[in-house]
Image: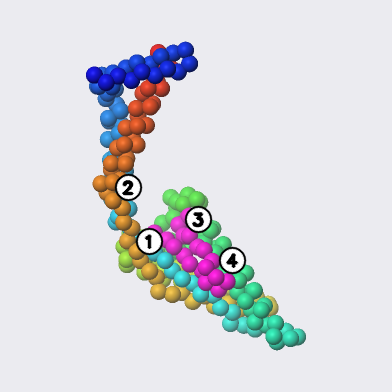
Amino acid sequence: MPKINASLGDKKIEFNIKEFLAKHKLIWVFALLVAAAAGIFSWRATQNYTGSLALTISRSGTQNAIDYKFDSYYALKATDEFGSTVVGWFKTPEIASVINARLGIDSSGWSLSALSGKFKAAKISPNLVEVRYGATSQDDVKKIASAVSQVIAEKVNLLNSSSGQGLAFVVIAGEPVAVKNTYNLLLGVLAGFLVGLVFGFFIMVARDYFYR
């Protein structure tokens, strides 16, 4: 039967692989549990979608300038800064909570990190922000995009009405794009089994060594 001989310091380890696995059946049980968890994760992931929504930011108001040639520069700079503000909104728990309420979802059981991580917003250009989020179906992708558009429009209108500088911004939402998540179920189960087997094997070896 195959044996493994190893030395660690002044101690030596020698054991039969077949006898070891027969003795420590928990390794197989642990590996199967990890494989099952990986399979469930892969299966659930394949049922989900990722949505992408583009938000175009534009300045609708103008500001008096001594030299009108600089107005376009200030407009671009203001739009760029406002785009950063929009991205910042999606990093806060508030925006996700408000959108959940608009969708009829109870956020009372959500943590702050879960709320702030629901949406991933990034500024693609000074006046373009992309928002990505997860959904369970293509219809949900569209519903969430509609709620996002409404909530952002309301926040923008509130800022415009409270601004005393004669500046106003408009955020135009594009058509949401839904992409189905694809995972290899068999590969996920196999990878989970191997990881569980290796991890469980080394835990057993370490335990036998240190408690010998």
**Residue placed under numbered mark 3 in the picture:** 116
**For residue 21, side relative to residue 110 (left or right):** left
Mark 3 and mark 1 lie on one chain; the one further toward the N terminus is 1
Callout 3: helix, strand or loop? helix
Residue 53 pos. (x, y %):
43, 69
Q: Is residue 55 visible?
A: yes
- Residue range corresponding to the magenta coloring: 115-134
**Residue placed under numbered mark 4 in the picture:** 84
Mark 3 and mark 2 lie on one chain; the one further toward the N terminus is 2
Callout 4: helix, strand or loop? helix
Which picture quadrant has residue 57? Answer: bottom right
Q: CA distance from mark 4 to mark 1?
A: 23 Å
Q: Identity of the amino acid at label 2?
A: Phe
Vertical position of residue 21 compared to residue 10: above or below: below
* Residue displayed at 30% across by 19% down: 3
* Residue displayed at 50% across by 55% down: 116
Q: Residues within 10 Å of mark 4 (few under 14, many from 20)?
A: some
Mark 4 and mark 1 lie on one chain; the one further toward the N terminus is 1
Residue 4 pos. (x, y %):
33, 20
Of tags 4 and 3, the one toward the viewer is 4
Q: CA distance from mark 3 to mark 2?
A: 22 Å
**Residue placed under numbered mark 1 in the picture:** 50
Q: Identity of the amino acid at label 4?
A: Ser
Callout 2: helix, strand or loop? helix
Q: CA distance from mark 3 to mark 1?
A: 17 Å
**Residue placed under numbered mark 2 in the picture:** 41
Residue 113 pos. (x, y %):
50, 50
Q: Is residue 154 magenta?
A: no
Vertical position of residue 117 compared to residue 207: above or below: below
